């Protein structure tokens, strides 16, 4: 499929797909005229990349965590490098801290609404 259809199916933009390609996260095929050709597995990979990006994981860690785009088995590499795992844990811990702050803020707003008689 062409880039426009792949963008639509993956819920992203053609520009984002080109960026993912530039970053080495996806490798679409090419037609003889040079146009990109996206298969379903590439679109599925884009969905995974987007989910990881939305978690806040940096591109360089996503690149390490995913199997190579040309890996025929599609198996995840052995990401057991201590530094990689330390960075992923640190990212997870930062997310947990943000969640805790947001939960506290939500509880404060709930208390305000309850005390003001406004309810939920």
Image (tube, rainbow, N blue to C red):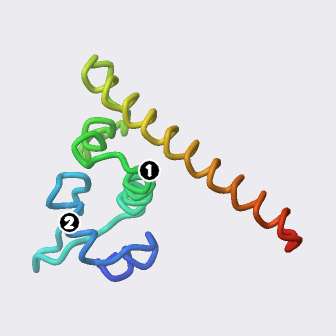
Alpha-carbon span between mark 1 and mark 2: 18 Å
Please name whichever residue, 54 or 76, is drawn nearer the observer in this view of the structure: 54
The residue where tag 1 is placed is 55
Q: Position of residue 93 (x, y in %)?
A: 45, 33
Residue 66, quarter of the rendered image: top left
Label tally: 2
Residue 37, quarter of the rendered image: bottom left
Q: In the image, which is nearer the foreground, mark 1 or mark 2?
A: 1
Q: Residues within 10 Å of mark 1 (few under 14, many from 20)?
A: few
Q: Position of residue 11 (x, y in %)?
A: 45, 73
Taking the spot 14% from the left edge, 60% from the top edge, the residue there is 22
Q: Position of residue 50 (x, y in %)?
A: 40, 58
**Tag 2, which secondary structure?**
helix
Q: Earlier in the sequence, mark 1 or mark 2?
A: 2
**Quarter of the image containing the N terminus?**
bottom left
The residue where tag 2 is placed is 19
**Tag 1, which secondary structure?**
loop
Q: Residues within 10 Å of mark 2 (few under 14, many from 20)?
A: few
Name the side, left or right, on which 21 lies relative to 40: left
Please name whichever residue, 31 or 98, is drawn nearer the observer in this view of the structure: 98
Name the side, left or right, on which 101 lies relative to 54: right
Please name whichever residue, 48 or 87, is drawn nearer the observer in this view of the structure: 87
Taking the spot 69% from the left edge, 55% from the top edge, the residue there is 108
Q: Is residue 100 above or below residue 112?
A: above
Residue 76, quarter of the rendered image: top left
């Amino acid at each position: 499929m062409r880039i426009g259809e792949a963008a639509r199916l993956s819920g992203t933009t053609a520009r984002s797909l080109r960026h993912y390609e530039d970053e080495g996260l996806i490798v679409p095929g090419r037609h003889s005229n040079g146009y990109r050709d996206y298969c379903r597995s590439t679109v599925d990979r884009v969905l995974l990349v987007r989910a990881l990006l939305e978690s806040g994981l940096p591109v360089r860690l996503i690149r390490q965590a995913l199997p190579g785009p040309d890996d025929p088995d599609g198996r995840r590499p052995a990401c057991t490098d201590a530094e990689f795992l330390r960075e992923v844990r640190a990212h997870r811990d930062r997310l947990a801290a943000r969640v805790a702050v947001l939960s506290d803020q939500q509880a404060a707003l709930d208390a305000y609404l309850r005390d003001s008689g406004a309810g939920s």
